[in-house]
Amino acid sequence: MQLDDLYRRVIMDHYKNPRNRGKFEDDAVTVDLNNPTCGDRISLQLKVENGVVADAKYTGEGCSISMSSASMMTDAVKGKSLEEALSLADRFSSLMQGEDVEFEEYEDIEALSGVNKFPARIKCATLAWNALRKGIDAK
């Protein structure tokens, strides 16, 4: 199996079987973002306790890239300090710029590395991560 095929399967798995999809009924930091270019939209909710992302959920609609990225991001940031979560967002930005970045703690994210070959799709992949940054800034 080619690496591209494996990455495609990982992306589709997160799209068809999203992790952390849903919403909190009680207090949470909530960020709503959309990509007017393609219509992707996300509502990200973060539960932050003592400077740590205790939990994260999202709802939204969009392409497989944006929704898979949201699924991966919410999985990756749970249990991370706000600083560690921002560091993950920075590393993801570098990945989208074509840099060779590894995510040892959550390898599924690397499946999105091929997105940088399609500039119009980078905004799809970064939508959830931009919401994460806004949510942390609001905290």
Image: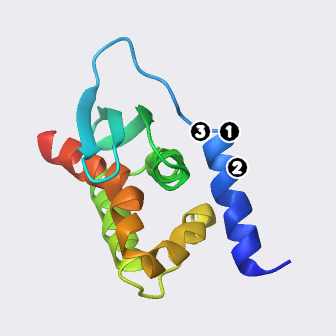
- Answer whether labels 2 and 1 touch (C-beta < 8 Å): yes
Q: CA distance from mark 2 to mark 1?
A: 6 Å
Q: Is residue 79 visible?
A: no
Q: CA distance from mark 3 to mark 1?
A: 7 Å
Residue 46 horizontal/vertical position (percent)? 33, 34
Picture quadrant where residue 139 is located: top left
Query: Is residue 27 depicted above or below 85 in this figure?
Result: above
Camera-side residue of 79 and 36: 36
Looking at numbered disc 3 in the image, what kind of residue is underneath it?
Arg
Task: Tell me what residue is drawn at x 34 percent, y 44 percent.
Answer: 39
What mark, if any, has residue 2 been given in the picture?
none
Looking at numbered disc 2 in the image, what kind of residue is underneath it?
Asp
What mark, if any, has residue 13 been given in the picture?
2
Residue 27 horizontal/vertical position (percent)? 28, 17
Looking at numbered disc 1 in the image, what kind of residue is underneath it?
Asn
What mark, if any, has residue 19 been given in the picture?
3
Q: Say whether residue 125 is left or right of residue 109.
A: left
Camera-side residue of 15 and 106: 15
Q: Say whether residue 55 is left or right of residue 107.
A: left
The secondary structure type at the circle numbered 1 is loop
Crowding around mark 3 (Cα neighbors within 10 Å: few <14, some 14 to 19, many 20+) is many
Residue 107 horizontal/vertical position (percent)? 61, 67
- Answer whether labels 3 and 1 touch (C-beta < 8 Å): yes
Question: What residue did someone put label 1 on?
Answer: 17
Q: Say whether residue 71 is left or right of residue 46.
A: right
Query: Is residue 121 depicted above or below 65 in this figure?
Result: below
Camera-side residue of 47 and 39: 39
Residue 85 horizontal/vertical position (percent)? 35, 56
